[in-house]
Image: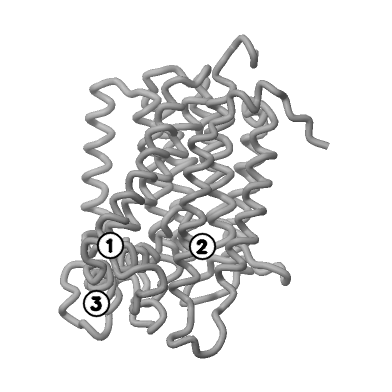
């Protein structure tokens, strides 16, 4: 039985939790609206019910992860990292194939996405690894961090293939390295190598992409080149966002979702469905909710009582912010479609569970910032 400390309730970040919960409820309502059958014909797919069940499980997970001192997980980082890498390898051989990708492991009663679980393990592991390193980082520690936490997971996730998550992991590795600290000379050299490597590795990366991934990039550059084929998703997404106007059509009044004009309307393209029903004003309110969460998460990285807590908070903040901007960007046609879900809103049990675990650890860091209460 969990023992709830009164001080934990006093210092619990209720603002962040309530906002995240509210965004999740908005997401469930939008999932229902997006997947409902047109003209009340037939039955709605149970996506929104499944998401509600996952939300309840995620809340219970959050409660568990805030009840113990986050510092205790630091000593298990290597074991966790080995488990995470092992899952990424297992999915390549035993993963369930869907839409040309092996991203899920099927256990019979449910499927889960190892790359989503790895994100949590990755942030914990890289934070623990960097905590005791001298700041600014030496060239040796910088290279070691980049290879262990950036390049190895990047290559494994790319093999699934999951370009969006692979790039995300590599990007956050770079962010964490810079956050930990580099000398000006090493920082310039590091950034120069990153930029030049993109140029030299582009042809190799392009050759390794699946056909649908190449088409996504082509469609991003010019979606009108094939409006009924590779450019269809982006063009329909932009049309859906624009059709909401200033105040939107109203809840359950949107047409792009239920009439199935927009693919992946309850997952990657859930934002256009919300935009069509609630309009520009509704989107501004939603963005304000997200930015409040981002600001509070970043604030936690500033006020954390130790380096491990600071790194944990900035790592999870980076994940939430990058996922948010990439998803919104691709639905507006200003970024390539890379299969990145909108945090807390898009349908997906593993993703929701991973996001709540991340928020739980950030709240944990914020709660235990007081040395007097939590030595």
The residues bearing labels 1 and 3 have C-alpha atoms spaced at a distance of 24 Å
Which residue appears farthest toward the bottom when viewing the image? Answer: 41
- For residue 28, which numbered disc appears in the image? 2
Name the one closer to the observer, 146 or 325. 325
The colour style of the image is one colour
Which is in the foreground here, disc 1 or disc 3?
1
Q: Earlier in the sequence, mark 2 or mark 3?
A: 2
In the rendered structure, the answer to whether residue 235 lies left or right of residue 182 reads: left
| Residue 265: percent from left, percent from top | 41, 72
| Residue 297: percent from left, percent from top | 44, 33
Residue under pointer 1: 279
Q: Residue at x 23, y 23 (%)?
A: 185
Q: Residues within 10 Å of mark 3 (few under 14, many from 20)?
A: many
Q: Is there any visible trace of residue 206 in the rendered image?
A: no
Under circle 2, the secondary element is helix
Q: Is there any visible trace of residue 191 in the rendered image?
A: yes
């Amino acid at each position: 039985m969990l023992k709830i400390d009164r001080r934990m309730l006093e210092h619990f970040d209720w603002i962040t939790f309530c906002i995240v919960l509210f965004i999740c409820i908005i997401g469930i309502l939008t999932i229902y609206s997006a997947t409902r059958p047109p003209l009340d014909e037939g039955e709605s797919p149970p996506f929104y019910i499944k998401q509600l069940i996952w939300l309840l499980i995620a809340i219970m997970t959050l409660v568990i992860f805030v009840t113990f001192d986050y510092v205790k997980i630091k000593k298990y980082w290597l074991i966790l990292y080995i488990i995470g890498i092992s899952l990424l390898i297992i999915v390549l051989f035993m993963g369930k194939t869907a839409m040309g990708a092996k991203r899920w492991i099927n256990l019979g009663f449910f499927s889960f996405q190892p790359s989503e679980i790895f994100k949590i393990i990755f942030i914990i592991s890289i934070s623990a690894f960097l905590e005791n390193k001298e700041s600014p980082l030496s060239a040796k520690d910088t290279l070691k961090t980049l290879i262990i936490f950036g390049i190895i997971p990047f290559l494994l996730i790319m093999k699934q293939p999951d370009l969006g998550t692979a790039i995300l992991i590599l990007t956050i590795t770079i962010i964490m390295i810079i956050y930990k600290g580099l000398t000006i000379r090493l920082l310039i050299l590091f950034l120069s190598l990153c930029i030049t490597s993109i140029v030299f590795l582009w042809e190799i990366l392009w050759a390794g992409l699946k056909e649908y991934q190449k088409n996504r990039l082509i469609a991003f550059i010019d979606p009108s080149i094939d409006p009924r084929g590779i450019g269809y998703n982006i063009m329909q997404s932009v049309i859906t966002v624009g059709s909401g106007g200033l105040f939107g059509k109203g809840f359950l009044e949107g047409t792009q979702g239920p009439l199935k004009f927009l693919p992946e309307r309850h997952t990657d393209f859930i934002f256009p469905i919300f935009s069509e029903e609630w309009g520009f004003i509704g989107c501004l309110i939603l963005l304000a909710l997200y930015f409040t969460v981002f600001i509070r998460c970043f604030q936690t990285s500033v006020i954390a009582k130790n380096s491990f807590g600071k790194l944990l908070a900035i790592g999870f903040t980076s994940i939430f912010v990058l996922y948010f901007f990439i998803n919104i960007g691709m639905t507006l046609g200003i970024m390539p479609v890379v299969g990145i879900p909108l945090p807390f809103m898009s349908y997906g049990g593993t993703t929701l569970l991973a996001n709540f675990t991340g928020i739980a650890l950030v709240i944990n860091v914020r709660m235990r910032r007081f040395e007097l209460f939590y030595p």
